[in-house]
Image (cartoon, rainbow, N blue to C red):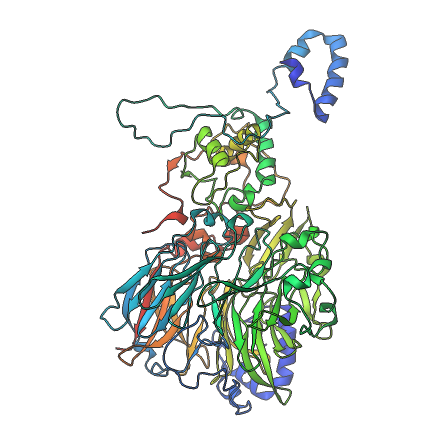
Amino acid sequence: MISSPHIGRVSVSSQFGRWTRIGGALLLLAGCSRSPDRPVQSGQHTASLPARVPATAALSDSADDGQWIMPARNYASTRYSSLSQITAQNVGQLKLAWTFSTGVTRGHEAAPLVVDNTMYIVTPFPNYLYALDLTQPGAPAKWTYKPSPALSAQGVACCDLVNRGAAYYDGKIYFNSLDATTHAVDAKTGKEVWSTRVGDINKGESTTMAPLVVKGKVLVGNSGGEFGVRGWLTALDAKTGKLAWRAYHTGPDKDVLIGSRFKPFYSHDKGKDLGVSTWPGDAWKIGGGGVWGWISYDPDLDLIYYGTANPGPWNADVRPGDNKWTAAMFARDPDDGQAVWSYQWSPHDLFDYDGINELVLLDLPIKGQMRKVLVRPERNGYIYVLDRTTGEVLSADPYGYITTTKGVDLKTGRPIEVPEKAPETGKVVREICPAAPGTKDWQPSSYSPRTRLLYIPHQNLCQDEEGVEANYISGTPYVAAIVKMYAGPGGNRGVVTAWNPVERKAVWQVKEKFPVWSGTVVTAGDIMFYGTMDGWFKALNARDGSELWKFKVGSGIVGQPIVYRGPDGKEYVAVLSGVGGWAGAVVAGGLDVRDSSAALGFVNAMKDLPQATTKGGMLYVFSLP
Amino acid sequence: MCSRFREGGAAAGQRGRSFAALRMTAGAVIVLVACQREERNFSGMPPSATSTMPAARESGLQPGPSVRSTSINGPYEQNAYGVAQGKTLYNAFNCSGCHFQGGGGIGPPLMDDEWVYGSRPENIFETIAEGRPNGMPSFGGKINPDQIWQIVAYVRSMSGLLRKDVATGRNDDMQVRSQEQAADKAKPVQSALPPSAERQ
């Protein structure tokens, strides 16, 4: 009743049935009162929750300075701004304040930074870093830093030539260029402080993630799960750029930095050198498990949290075993990188379900007790709530249509697989849902402590897949699968879901024609912003999902919107437009839609995108008049 | 010539036996007809670190008196067997990992009419052997030149630049595009830069 118009079939519907029983009359009432095309209303519903605001003091923004100094705004990765000038009452008057052309045409996935009245933007390859002066009318550029990455790096970037942003720390801007190089640039002068090569493009390694700086360590990982890399997370000294530690995600424990402190929750994660023994032969050496998503940090527990990417190749026939520690996550000590616990989302991943999505650190009332948790909308289709001190899975609920698994066994922590959906060499398996990009890919969610909802931008895609013979040639793709994606049930390829992690249910959903490949941001004015791939930047009422305002930008949006306070004291909203990324490669790379397998099969699901948008990077900044 | 045709392969061997039987009755005429088949070259040259052909011109602009451009006909342009071999090699050497079945992804599409570094066989040979600056790896010394020429012929068949009866007509894997044999000839046009390399 409640679920079918919004999420889809079978598994989710049954889950909703259960939630309805749990949630009781209020949810039923809300579901019945809405009109068929409107999202489920949530207003009174959230009011029934315990009054306690579910975010620790240490992790919240007690004094919001209006800046945006790291990719997710804070270490807890909430992307919540406590600015409140823009409200449901006045957001309709939002006007374009100024724009800036980046001069680059690939997918703009980054979040701008705002520090000391300067905005910093890092572009896709060739990875220009711009500093814009917010104190001057029209925010002219103060300086541009051009890292001049190796052109050949373009040949080892799986999914467009994106960059997911920069981080500010102690007077410097840190970011990666595509050619596996990390740069530190003086925030005032634009002069390079140091530049460190962290990987080798001839091994298929590239760097696309936004670094996170924790306790003087710049944390970066490698991309290249489609090129047979051996994945790692590396800490560089923020002052010098020298290697502090590196943790691999395959291989012996000493390489993975698994030592005496390692206490995983589940028994199958315990044992010596599992990063070797869960692979055949030397396959772990080219087994993937990179890091190209998000890192969170809990200063109280002094632990960093991040996920690892898919194992390689996609064709799983050549890598029997759990393939640790790919498609997993780690809690580590930021000082020495030592692992404290790990959890594997998708043991022996069959579908390219990278485990790299955001980890939102919250304190939530679970079964009457406040727990330190991390909330994870995972690529495999489940929203996980884990105890972030122990790695125990407290809940895992579907937020999209899933055919590949039948839930997560909370006793073992493992997804319950559906054997007939396992791809094999020479066999075509159809209706694999979610498709390879998962129910949600890298595009980050936001969380509001006011509404206690997680705003998840995601997609609704399925795929057909055939495994083919795998040939490892270093520096070339190592995938060995032919894939063809298409829209999931309902036909809408994109969804924004507002999720209550305590009650474990979707409170409202908005469907979009194309995958929602942008991030979301939510404010204390209870406004949630996101962009669409056909170029609409939208403001929704964070409480009920109703659309309050939208603006058509030049190119589809795959970037991460931010909210900041300008030198004039006004609240501004900024977003990069510039379609691309894996979902938008058909436009950014000028691909041919007659080949359904193009761009790892994503092109088949995006054949109409070239009619809906054109490429080109542009920053848009909005404010009230 | 005739002996070369008969040098190997299961299918050829089978035919060889039936031809032997036929020859007893029909005589030399049949042998002569058999020798009209296209040539199959089963043993390629060994890999070499250097390209075995002169540099292919890619610019139509020639300062001073016009110099006749070096043009090399690909040896497999009219050879169905070579094109089929090229298709196998295209997948085996992971060309498909970047260009997929012609639609592109990491590398540009190969089934359309746009050519960044030239559409002639010698241009494509050089692209594969020497690599290109915007991400195309250099396979020279990794794939032997004879096999590169087979890949060249297959790549050209993707946009219908070969005769239809030479292009491949079947696919053993999941259908993701129409057969190369059905591709309409796409008149090659020059493209300035790969989209990836566009910049200020």
Q: Position of residue B182 (x, y in %)?
A: 52, 35
Most extreme residue toward the left is: A137
User: Where is A621 relative to A18, above or below?
Assistant: above
Left or right of A47 in this view: A94: left
Residue A406: give x, y in percent of width and height: 69, 68
Left or right of B110? Residue A105 is left
Residue ID at (43%, 86%) = A62
Q: Position of residue B164 (x, y in %)?
A: 52, 29
Q: Is residue B174 something that shows in the picture?
A: yes
Displayed quadrant of residue A422: bottom right
Q: Position of residue A197 (x, y in %)?
A: 48, 56
- Out of A441 and A172, give the one closest to the viewer: A172
**Residue A603 in the image: above or below residue A441:** above
Judge by depth and name the residue closer to the eye, A609 or A59: A59
Q: Is residue A357 above or below residue B37?
A: below
**Quadrant in which the C terminus of chain A appears:** bottom left
Q: Nearer the viewer, residue A87 or A137?
A: A137
Q: Nearer the viewer, residue A240 or A458?
A: A240
Q: Is residue A320 above or below residue A264?
A: above
